[in-house]
Amino acid sequence: MIRSALMNVMTAAAIKAGRGLKRDFGEVENLQVSVKGPGDFVTSADKRAEKVLFEELSKARPGYGFVMEEGGTIEGSDKTHRWLIDPLDGTLNFLHGLPMFAISIALEREGQIVAGLIYNPVNDDMYVAEKGQGAWQNNHRLRVAARRDFADALVGCGVGPLARAKDHPRFKSELSSVLARAANIRRLGAASLDLAHVAAGRLDAYWERGLNSWDIGAGIILVREAGGFVSDGEGGEDMLESGSICVGNEIMHRNLLALLRKSAVESASGANKSPA
Ligand code: IPD
Ligand code: CA
Ligand code: CA
């Protein structure tokens, strides 16, 4: 695994915040059966984790800026560095007692992501990548899957809740295009871990829209350092701004992107509309 000073800082912060999340996750499992449910408790669990990450990273790298899901954007005195942080990615999984959630931390230097970490405290899976240093899960090096035939591909995806229902028609059309060609799809519920699974070769490809920079910052460098291809949903480089992402090995990425484009053309022409 990468043992740079920077990575030591990032892993130490994640382990500390993860300890609290793991404890809170145990509590959530008990709260499932209570009438009130674990909703409010989870909201405070992710705020607590974010506070730990903010304090630890500020102490170790004073002056760096922050973009955090809960706390928003905090300008730093050092304008060249910025952390992108999701203290709990996969909140709905966490809330339902599903152990698939993670802390996601990325570091931007002059607008480029140079380091990423994704950590699931339940099983201690620590994924890290630094520019030029490869991608790692704990002590082993990651490579994207080598599959070449899209018909064999297991493809990850994601879709927003009812509050983002305007995105659903496009998702449905993309989903039906992908389902018609791939082995099958998975919707696992934490964008950071979806990207980690692609880096580790478990998923062959993944796409999603409507995400934020803190969901995908770390995963982008992890997939690239594992030899994968990353673009936004249109094939450009605008993942962090647009919130859309499409990843895979070179062939899977090309195939998936082509399907997304084809489904955009078909939806625009009405070809995919279901009868009223
Ligand atoms: C969510 C997860 C989910 C994705 C959502 C994200 P959160 O993050 O990554 O997989 O589909 O769009 O917002 O809310 O659990 O931090
Ligand atoms: Ca998230
Ligand atoms: Ca979150």
Image (cartoon, rainbow, N blue to C red):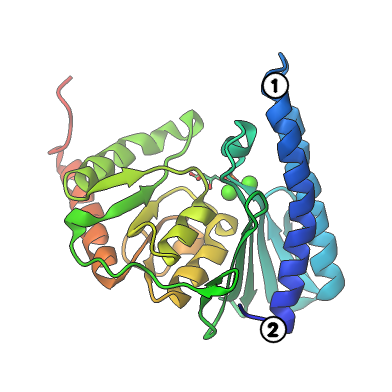
Q: Residue furthest top?
A: 35
Q: Which mark is residue 37?
A: 1
Q: In the structure shown, which secondary structural element does the residue marked by tag 1 occupy?
A: loop
Sequence order check, earlier mark of 2 and 1: 2
> Residue 75: where, in percent of width, then height?
76, 66
**In the image, 176: left or right of 117?**
left
Nearest the camera: 112 or 44?
44
Residue for point 54% across, 53% down: 212
* Ligand 1 quarter of the rendering: top right
Q: Amino acid at mark 1?
A: Gly
> Residue 218: where, in percent of width, then height?
56, 65
Quadrant location of the N terminus in the rendered image = bottom right
For residue 247, say whether it is visible.
Answer: yes
Nearest the camera: 273 or 42?
42
Q: Mark 1: is the Cβ under 8 angstroms from ligand 1?
A: no
Residue for point 29% across, 70% down: 146
**In the image, 9: left or right of 258?**
right
Q: Mark 2: is the Cβ under 8 angstroms from ligand 2?
A: no
Q: Which residue is mark 2?
A: 4
Q: Please tell me how crowded label 1 is: few (under 14), some (14-19), or many (20+) other residues with Cα within 10 Å.
A: some
Asked if residue 18 is positioned above or below residue 40 in the image, the reply reads: below
Asked if residue 114 is positioned above or below residue 83 in the image, the reply reads: below
Q: In the structure shown, which secondary structural element does the residue marked by tag 2 occupy?
A: loop
Q: CA distance from mark 2 to mark 1?
A: 42 Å
Nearest the camera: 25 or 131?
25
Q: Which mark is residue 163?
A: none
Residue for point 72% across, 79% down: 6
Q: Quadrant of residue 237?
A: bottom left
Residue for point 50% across, 51% down: 191
